[in-house]
Amino acid sequence: MRPRDIACSDEPLFELLRQDDHAEAPAEIAHHLDTCERCRSRMEVLAAEPADWERARATLSAAATGFPGESRAMFDRVGTWKTWKLPTSSVDSMVRQVLLEPSHPEMLGRIGRYDVERVIGAGGMGIVFKAFDTELNRPVAIKVLAPNLAGNGSARQRFAREARAAAAVVHEHVVAIHNVETGGPAPFLVMPYVAGESLQQRIDREGPLGLKEILRISMQTAAGLAAAHAQGLVHRDVKPSNILLEDGVDRALLTDFGLAQANDDASLTHTGFHPGTPQYMSPEQARGDAVDARSDLFSLGSVMYAMAAGRPPFRAETSLAVLRRITDTEPRPIREINPELPDWLGKVISHLLAKSPGRRFSSAAELAATLEQCLAHVQHPTSSRLPETCRTATKFSGKGLLRALQERKTAVLAIAVPLAAAVAFAFLGPRTRPLDPSDRALNQPSARGNSDRNDETSTPSSPSIDWNHSAAEIQSFADDLARDAKRIEQLWDEEPLPSQGVRP
């Protein structure tokens, strides 16, 4: 049966552009495009502006010629294809549909009492603006539901759910919600404007991060998650792009609760696929099982892995293959990718990436406390010790013990040598003192001729060595021993230096 004809309009063309790359075009639209030259030309215009096509042409040309001269500069400005979001024309179309005329010529438009300055980002669900609250005189970020979804009941419900979930969490490491408007033609929510970048942008720019930065960002994100979990909410989409890093302040903020749902929500108990970013999903999410707060801990473990390695722990060519790896395989150990990081950090991440939720940390609050102790130890190694779980795992793990001993700082050896001498003197010295007459009498053969007794019933005499140390000197040795033992314990807990030609 021949598909029915459709009228020449932009809406079905927009629908086609919004589809997933691998989705098959609806039969009616495909048939119409086959027969209508006007719509084919219009499709090209809607897909991108002429300038976009020109940049793409220059980029492809540069790729084919090795990026000479201006083409290389053009490629650097445009960036890779994977960083492109919606085509410029689609963003412009959404902006025109959701914004009112600007009240000031320097502004892009207006939403209610908010003067919109510029677009921060855009995606399939909506668009985010930087704006100014004219009543409270402060910059804000406004997230507006995409116009094509505003008429969809389920999309509006999901948008309202994000607003309610985020507004329920009040914490210094969670982006707050100032205002929510869900009844108008274009639902939107208002958040504080965070000047900075996302964690994903930081990783893309710098690659693996330093130890202190990994611990700080992870600790603060865990604290934000603990606040959400205390409200009965599971984020379900913890990933680097949903963690904002504020400029000029060492502060990370968790955002985008669009997938959050209450722990007792019935929709979490049915079998089926739950949305989220594949690379950072938990195994239970990947299988479509029920999830709880420990699912967010697995995702945060994946984020920590990405900060340490510069890439997610599970990668593959397709989303399905990524999900299979999450459920069935273990990621490559962190120390093999970044040997500069301490072994105990790899153990913390492995603990979070356990396939079974019961083997992970019990809560985000416990994880935040552990990471806080770890950060304090890294900043002040002589006065702050690692958490007991990290110290135990690092010190007494078979071959790890031998490796730790061989990599320990040379200062330990400088103390250990004289300490060993002191120990030998303190414990062996008294055994070499000359025996008093009563001791000798005990060691002499009896008058009844027991000189032929074996060694089990007789004690050989000790050599005569003078003992010239006073009680005060012995006490001084004991004090030195206690002080050096305490120093060795502190050095033991410090991060070991890389081994230099020493093999276990």
Image (spheres, helix red, strand yellow):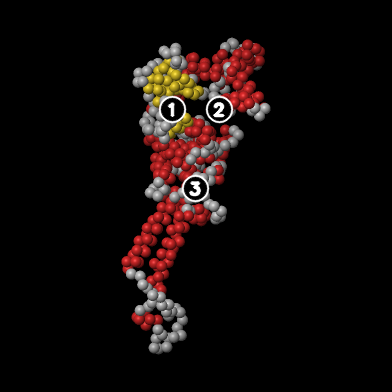
**Which x, y percent locates residue 37?**
65, 12
Residue 244's disc number: none
Query: Who comes first in sequence, dot 3 or dot 1?
Result: 1
Q: Secondary structure at mark 1?
A: loop
Tell me the tag on residue 195.
1
- In the rendered view, would you say 117 is above or below 246? above
Whole-number angstrom distance, CA of label 2 to CA of label 1: 20 Å
Q: Alpha-carbon distance for marks 3 and 2?
A: 34 Å
Q: Residue at x 50, y 45 (%)?
A: 341
Q: Residue reaching furthest right? A: 65
Q: Which residue is mark 3?
A: 343
User: How many numbered markers are drawn?
Assistant: 3
Task: Give the amino acid at mark 2.
Answer: Thr
Q: Nearer the viewer, mark 2 or mark 1?
A: 1
User: For the residue carrying disc 3, how many other residues have a C-alpha within 10 Å: few (<14), some (14-19), or many (20+)?
Assistant: some
Which residue bears the numbered disc 2?
A: 83
